């Protein structure tokens, strides 16, 4: 009797229609991954094996397999929306349970936590190690990402790095250095530094070439907040640039190839009291001139940096392709705060679908592999974007027509069997 085959075909075709309908229904769902119904034939069990004329008893759905192919990337107006371009999943915290998702529609809650559109916490590295240029060189402490929305406390300047070229053809000044007489020095630079209260101060360094018999040697003088040419004490506002040697100037020595002698590349000024005394901490700055040269040609700066800043308030948050979340502050500073992580699995098809664009791992997925975006096998992320569902609507509609015809065909086998039985019943 072919009723068994027809019924199994109807059941399988019905489930296939459900799968296709679900795919079509989620065309607009961010991060959705389409599924495919996979069929297998069914044979009756035989104690000693099957015979040469055994006929199958129908079909069955053995698996509804999700297709983890890349969806298209669409731009949005939310800088906290994130799309994964490549392999991997966002790691989410659901009250201690770890879930995974490709939906990167994120935003901040009232406490500054980064959450998805169902309120789950987005996880990442909450402690970053930065170099002097605020580049991320290390990440640690996996946890819920939280952006500190409080004011950024001021930081006094403690380091000052300048890379410059001093003109080897400069003529040494003939008069003693005074900052208000440009004929007493050859070159100067000015930058902004900060005290412990975040108050900005103007720091000017003056470079004066020494006369013969000393060659390839320059004196560096420092002044804070300018100078007054009418004052009776020219040392007012002057930094002791060679504090360890109790000298007002630091000496830079170059060899006959124009390279700075390493021993003269660094100095620290004697603690400088900013008036009125006691209003703020004394200013002590470690100066570095490493990489500077003395070549013929115009004197000029190649690089200039210092590590202080004023008080700031968060005015924006951005995410780069490596998942680093940076805060932008009213003091002009952009600082990396935390970093997203991407989870990968050897067998992502074994992930358990939980709904709301989330999956859970099990023993069949393999060990979770955590990387920052773009590292190892993890894909990169694109901020201000979301990943569209990977559903090909045209193909799904064609598949829907085919599935409908399969359903009708299986119904016809039952109808044909019914007619045959009716004929047998009517035999006289």
Image: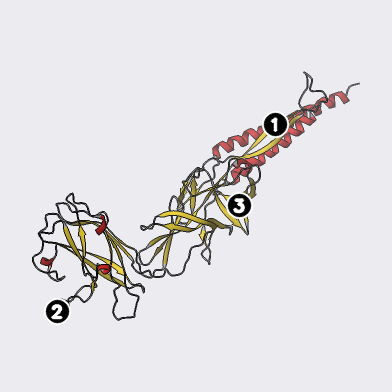
Quadrant hosting residue 283: bottom left
Measured Cα–Cα span from mark 2 to mark 3: 71 Å
Q: Pointer 2: what residue? A: 230
**Secondary structure at numbered mark 1:** strand
| Residue at the extreme left of the image, as rendered | 174
Number of residues whose C-alpha sits closer than 10 Å to that of mark 3, classed few (under 14), some (14–19) or many (20 or more): many
Nearer-the-camera pick, 385 or 8: 385
Measured Cα–Cα span from mark 1 to mark 3: 31 Å
Number of residues whose C-alpha sits closer than 10 Å to that of mark 1, classed few (under 14), some (14–19) or many (20 or more): few
The answer to whether one can see residue 116 in this image is no
Nearer-the-camera pick, 47 or 140: 140
Quadrant of the image containing the C terminus: top right
Relative to 23, does residue 211 appear above or below in the rendering?
A: below
Q: Residue at x 47, y 67 (%)?
A: 149
Q: Position of residue 303 (x, y in %)?
A: 27, 56
| Badge number at residue 99 | 3
Marks 2 and 3: which is nearer the front? 2
Quadrant hosting residue 413: top right
Marks 1 and 3: which is nearer the front? 3
Sequence-first tag of 2 and 1: 1
Quadrant of the image containing the N terminus: top right
**Secondary structure at numbered mark 2:** loop
Nearer-the-camera pick, 39 or 419: 39
Q: Residue at x 11, y 54 (%)?
A: 169
| Badge number at residue 40 | 1
Sequence-first tag of 2 and 3: 3
Q: How is the image coloured?
A: secondary structure
> Is the C-beta separation of discs 2 and 1 under 8 Å?
no
């Amino acid at each position: 009797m072919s009723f068994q085959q027809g019924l199994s075909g109807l059941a399988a075709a019905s489930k296939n229609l459900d799968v296709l309908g679900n795919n079509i229904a989620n065309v607009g769902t961010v991060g959705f991954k389409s599924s495919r119904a996979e069929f297998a034939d069914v044979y009756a069990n035989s104690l000693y094996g099957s015979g040469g004329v055994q006929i199958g008893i129908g079909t069955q759905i053995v698996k509804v397999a999700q297709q983890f192919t890349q969806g298209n990337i669409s731009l949005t107006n939310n800088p906290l929306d994130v799309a994964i371009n490549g392999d991997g999943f966002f790691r989410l915290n659901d009250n201690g349970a770890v879930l995974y998702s490709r939906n990167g529609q994120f935003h901040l809650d009232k406490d500054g936590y980064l959450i998805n559109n169902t309120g789950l916490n987005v996880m990442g590295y909450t402690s970053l190690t930065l170099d002097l240029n605020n580049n991320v060189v290390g990440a640690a402490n996996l946890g819920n990402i939280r952006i500190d929305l409080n004011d950024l406390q001021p930081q006094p300047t403690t380091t000052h790095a300048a890379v410059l070229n001093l003109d080897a053809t400069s003529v040494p000044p003939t008069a003693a250095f005074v900052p208000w007489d440009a004929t007493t020095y050859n070159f100067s630079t000015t930058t902004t530094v900060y005290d412990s209260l975040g108050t900005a101060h103007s720091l000017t360094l003056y470079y004066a070439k020494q006369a013969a018999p000393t060659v390839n040697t320059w004196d560096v003088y420092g002044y804070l907040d300018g100078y007054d040419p009418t004052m009776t004490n020219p040392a007012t506002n002057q930094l002791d640039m060679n504090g360890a040697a109790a000298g007002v100037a630091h000496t830079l020595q170059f060899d006959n190839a124009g390279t700075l002698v390493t021993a003269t590349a660094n100095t620290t000024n004697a603690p400088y009291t900013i008036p009125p005394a006691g209003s703020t901490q004394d200013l002590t700055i470690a100066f570095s001139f490493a990489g500077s040269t003395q070549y013929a040609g115009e004197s000029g700066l190649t690089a200039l940096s210092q590590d202080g800043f004023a008080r700031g308030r968060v005015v924006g948050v951005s995410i780069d392709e490596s998942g680093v979340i940076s805060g932008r502050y009213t003091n002009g500073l952009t600082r990396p705060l935390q970093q997203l992580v991407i989870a990968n699995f050897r067998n992502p098809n074994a992930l358990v679908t939980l709904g709301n664009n989330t999956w859970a791992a099990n023993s069949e997925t393999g060990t979770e592999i955590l990387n920052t975006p773009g590292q190892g096998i993890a894909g990169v992320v694109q901020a201000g974007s979301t990943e569209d569902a990977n559903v090909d609507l045209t193909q799904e509609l064609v598949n829907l027509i085919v599935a409908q015809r399969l359903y009708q065909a299986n119904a016809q086998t039952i109808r044909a069997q019914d007619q045959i039985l009716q004929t047998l019943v009517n035999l006289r």
